[in-house]
Image (tube, rainbow, N blue to C red):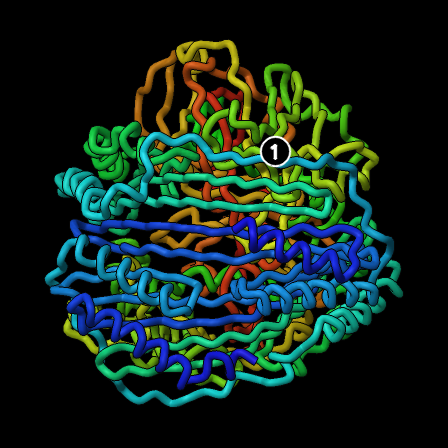
Amino acid sequence: MKDIALRALDTVVRRGVTYADARAVEIRERDITTKNGKAGHVASNESLGVGIRVLAGGCWGFAATDDVSRNGIDAAVALALEIARSGAAAKKHDVVLSPEEKFEATWVSPYRVDPFRIPVDRNLSVLLAVDEELRRNPGVNLAEAAMHFERRRQVFASTLGSVVDQTRYLTGTGYSALSYKNGEIQKRSYPNSFGGQHQLKGYELVEELQLLENAPRVAEEAVALHSADQCPEGEFNLILDSSQIGLQIHESIGHPIELDRVLGSEANYAGMSFLTLDQLGSLRYGSDIVNVVCDARPAHGPGLGTFAFDDEGVPAQSTDIIRDGRFVGYMTSRETAAQVGQTRSNGCMRADGWGRLPLIRMTNVSLKPGKQSLEEVFDADQAIYMETNRSWSIDDKRYQFQFGCEVAWEIRRGKRVRMLKNPSYSGITTEFWNACAAIAGPEHWKLWGLPNCGKGQPEQVMGTGHGASPARFHSIKIGSAYAG
Amino acid sequence: MLVEAFNPARCADVFNQVANAARTHGVSEIEIILAGSNQALTRFANSAIHQNVAERTTHLSVRPMIDGRTARAGTNRLDAEAIRQVVEEAVAITRLTEADAEMLPLASAAPYDPVDRHFEGTANATPEERAQAVAEAIAAVECEHQTAAGIYSTDESVFALMNSRGISAWYAETMARFSITAMARDSSGWAKASACNHAHLNPPDLARAASRKAAGSCSPRELPPGRYTVILEPAAVLDLVGQMFGDFSATAIRDGRSFLTDRIGKKLFGENITIHDDAWHPLQAGAPFDGEGVPRTRLTLVDQGVVREIAYSRQAAHAAGAAPTGHGYPLPNEYGESPANIVIEGGSASVEEMVKSTSRGILVTRFWYIREVDPYEKMFTGMTRDGVFLVEDGRITAGLRNFRFNQSLLELLSNAEMLSAPARVSGEEAFDMVVPAMKVRDFNFTDVTRF
């Protein structure tokens, strides 16, 4: 691995560049799914390759190959340089990078049980036991469960002299129960929808989540939704569970603080941001109790955005994004930091494997825990409490959003009084966060992993982390998805 | 070119190595997928090239069948040791899976009509060629005092599926895509096209189209949400209507997750809606066989508003007593199958005629961030983007701020009043299809954003 990265770097240095880096990446993945009592997708995959990024003539070029022979690397280096030089046809200015230091480091993400040492039949037996428990409820038509394991080793080498060897272990698991009845489909998932929980852990995550214990409740709720009342339409106090707040952070804080979006580089695809440069330090993003950080350091927890160094060799950092409700920070790269006059990148460049170039991506963007107890968060005369995301959508400047959840309950004086189906809420990002009235304390804070964030052309998929406690928001527009 | 590096003889050689390695484990039923791709993409923003990339990938995956069990292992290396290891892994995890009494033996060879979708010029397109086309497109936008962002990609891919029952399916394709967003002070416009032959793309024309939209939607007015007559340009139709075709699947219906559960044979849409799946349509792309090597067949999914046919993988067909249609995903999977080459029949109206016929309505260039709200009513939410226009008394009178919609596709395809001739269309939220523009009454906008 180190040989591959250094060979690529040596080759490119001999050809004359302003800057270059090479990432040799080896990925091992295993996926196991079950469906209605049977094994579904059982697969493993291994991939090895190198991505070479060069800055020549003021332009970037990037080429990646899985032919890691000397000839293969030579060809990729030549192509990266040819690509960089072609950029002169449409160049406005030379790329400038903020300064960075040289680092030599090795880091392995902490894990207790290597997931690849657990045999597939044991994985299947866990999932099939959950499946059986879900289908014990005759109203469940479709029980699906999944596990995903990943080991990703990357050696990064740059012309600054840095050589960083990182290995990250990732585990994900979850399940869902779907119920079809009389022209209506309802679904409940655990511990989260769209694949469950994902963290930078070993197999111990599977053992921690109490998958089997929660299955009867999940099945019962999926079936009960058919006879629940439709979520009302109007303005209500809204209480969200921590997983839904995680996604709300992702869409309405995480994406708009990407400085490359702000500066226009995603204008044709992922979109731009309402957080124009003039708003830094002045915008009232949320209420006084809203504090958000972007934190890639291992100390933040086993998030999907946890690492020791980003993919351009910048150490993991913690950056305040919202402090006491005020907008104070973006996520940056060496190039964008220099563009806005900052002296250093805050280390948010991440690439999807060896084949794609690093982009500014969320690391762990988390809402700090509040000071209220859970009882205080639920202490409202009337509110609607929603759990587990079902749909999410936001405009291309990350301003107007609508989320749907799998289930809701009407809350009266702090107690659940009835289940509600098809809940949704919508709003404007800054109005929503300014309506934040209560956040539960650290004992209710969970670090959720979203494994499927898309960005870039060609599209890259990245895992991000979002920590949150349950929280209450006042006067939120609810139910408009089914209005009209 | 990849078609030389991964020619059928080379693929057969890899298959033979896999089969020999499998035999050492006592396994004779084996399938491989061997794929290679060269992807190159020149990306620009703020009227300059800023991300400029190329990627060469190889993928070999191996699927044994052992006593009703199957699993798949993959690698991106093709040396002898890598092949030995991937076969060993595939056999090991297959032996540890659960047996499935419904699992069918590997598919047998059947002839398929070939398609020719590989163009040497596109496979050999250079960074300089893409950069020059991008520079011309940027110039077309900048001369209108706007800035440009977008991509120009040229890809070559080869896909081979071979098995121990004689299937030797091989397919090569090139694909080029050009997409551009033109940005003015308070508005934007967008255009995109794709073609197997990059010579069929015209980046400056697309740039001018995007630029006209940006200019025409400047100083956008805010209209209250509500139900409006809309004229959906083809990309808007593609990205929204394209969300429903995964439900035309026998497995999805059997699982109860399809909106077609209990609805096959019923009239769900207007009589002017007829939809086919046709891998051989001249504007389509993709292989003429499925993920098990079964030849694709043409389907009429919707005939004058009535749902007629759905896709069947081999396993779903066997369970239903039907014939497989050649739309299965590679095994093992839990989703079964899906149509892959959608062609929506159109009408004879142009978008201009739709505008002329509208006393008050909204013209939509494209939609963005479309997500399912209700799986059985097929209701989706999303936003308009990059060019929304007010139509009054048969002409475009203003640009509008972007709307959020919550719209059932059952209702939308029942309310289509006019259709254009279909075209190959490329969007961002559904795979490329052949679709018309549509004029639709009572489209449900529920919110409006600030730009």
Look at label 1 and name its amino acid.
Ile
| Chain for disc number 1 | A
Q: Nearer the viewer, residue B202 or B133?
A: B133
Q: Could you say which quadrant of the image residue A435 lies in? A: top right
Identified at 36% across, 40% down, the residue is: A172
Give the camera-side residue of A12 and B171: A12
Q: Position of residue A437 (x, y in %)?
A: 55, 16
Q: Residue A431: give x, y in percent of width and height.
A: 63, 28
The x and y percentages for residue A443 are: 42, 14
Q: Is residue A24 visible?
A: yes
* Residue B29 relative to residue A352: left or right: left
The answer to whether residue A375 is above or below residue B263 is above
Do we see residue A459 in this rendering?
Answer: no
Q: Which residue is at a point 36% across and 35% down the rendered structure image?
A: A202
SS of the residue under disc 1: helix
**x then y, percent, for residue A407:** 35, 33
Mark 1 neighbour class, 10 Å CA radius: few under 14, some 14 to 19, many 20 or more: many
Q: Is residue A368 left or right of residue B278?
A: right
Q: Is residue A97 left or right of residue A78?
A: right
Check the image and report above or below for A308 versus A180. above
Q: How many marks?
A: 1
Q: Residue at x 36, y 61 (%)?
A: B74
Q: Where is mark 1, residue-wise?
A: A253
- Rendered position, B349 above or below B250: below
Q: Nearer the viewer, residue A18 or B228?
A: A18
Q: Nearer the viewer, residue B83 or A218?
A: B83
Residue drawn where x is 76% and y is 44% of the image: A335
In the displayed structure image, the side of residue B317 where residue A5 appears, left or right: right
